Image (cartoon, grey):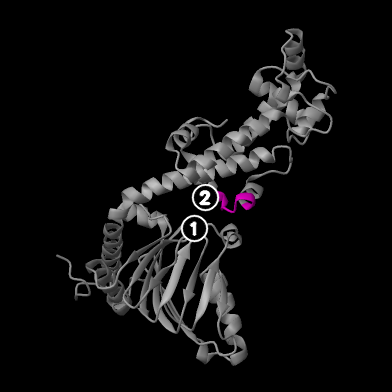
Amino acid sequence: MQTIGGNNEQPATAVQARAQVRLEDLPGRDRLAFWVDQVCAASAKAECEIADRTNITGQLSHLSIADLRINEMAMCAQSFRRTSYHLGQDDTELFAILLQRTGSSTIGFNGAAPQRLLPGDVSINTGLQQGVWKIEENADVVLTVVPSALMRQVVGFAHEHGAAPIARGTPVAHLVTLFLDTLLTQADTLSQASARCLRDGLLQTVAAALDPLATRANADETRLAAYHRARIQRFFMQHLHDTTLDMERIARGVQLSASQIHRLFAAQPGGGVMHRVWRARLDVSRKMIEALGAPLLSIAEVGWRSGFQSASHFSRSFKEHFGASPSEWRASAHSKGRQAAPSSTVEEGQTLPGVVAAVAARVESAWLAFVLGSNALATAFTQEPFI
């Protein structure tokens, strides 16, 4: 059996990086700038609100070991706020373990009721959430950042449902503290293999704490994911005519990151978001072309109103999808006397046909179903390919 820190180990091989800074060691005029720029913006990817900006104190000790980033932080009263803007700047998937050593703080994500942390409490969080972490008084904390890919590699999943508390005094909280203390105090004597063993033990312990929440969290996540998909689909259906509509615009419109949107649709029938956008544009343009009402739009005008930037792109995409050019499709539809539904008749000044309103209404109905708890409609909506 391998002995951690024993004589058979090669010392000082596990530490990947180490740094420490005390604000008191910096010139007074530089303390606030350093904390805001280096700790809040660069490290926490958040904006901070400091209670006493004229008398800011703090200390940051950073240790990178076994692909973990462990930060010991002594902080004065302040708040870290992560918004959709910060997620748009950096949507890296992260998994965080927060140990409250002294003082108290509150943490809350996505509008959920905030959790209050007292000395010895642990909070397990995902970094892809909007929320606030408020330090209520001078406090010492240990913030351990784990790449989500590493969490999945070690335990098979990464918690992605906001903040999950582990109360002080419980065996799990005790073990988490023990693993972190060992990594911090014995880092220079650990081999890479020993550090990885401690790391895996820490992550396995956290996973065990999350296991009772898994069934409930997965059900909540499924419901929440369907709600977000409905929001996303409603947004892009309302903006199909905009030729500049892209993933970045959609992400800003629904206040999610591009990677979150990608994950929401990755396993869904019907393809990714932009594939759905182009399919919807083609279906809308087909309705316009089939419409018999006056005025009869030109092919180029139909393409432009459907969100295509050029007539050539529109004609090429239409033929690839429907097997006939827009002109050929219109001639065939009209020669057969196909009558468009009243809602499909294109009227003067109408940007999109009635089909968009109908689809948007279906999205709205699904959203109401989630809010009101109507599982039947919600399930039917999420199982049916949208486009």
Mark 1 lies on residue: 128
**Relative to 73, does residue 259 appear above or below in the rendering?**
above
Q: Residue at x 84, y 30 (%)?
A: 348
Residue at screen point 53% across, 57% down: 91
Quarter of the picture holding the N terminus: bottom left
Give x and y (percent) for residue 264: 50, 44
Three-letter amino acid code of the residue under disc 2: Gln
Tag 2 residue? 260
In the rendering, at what x and y percent does residue 92 appear? 50, 57
Q: Quick one: label 1 or label 2, which is nearer the N terminus?
A: 1
- Residue at 58% of width from left, 92% of height from top? 27
Mark 2 crowdedness (10 Å alpha carbons): few <14, some 14-19, many ≥20:
some
Is 328 placed left or right of 11 in the picture? right
Q: Is residue 159 left or right of residue 319?
A: left
Q: Nearer the viewer, residue 367 or 352?
A: 367
Q: What is the distance, in whole Å, between disc 1 and disc 2 at their CAs?
A: 8 Å
Q: Is residue 253 magenta?
A: yes
Position of residue 294 measured from the top left corner of the image (x, y, whole percent): 84, 21
The reply to whether discs 1 and 2 touch (Cβ–Cβ < 8 Å) is: yes
Q: Label 2: state its secondary structure.
A: helix
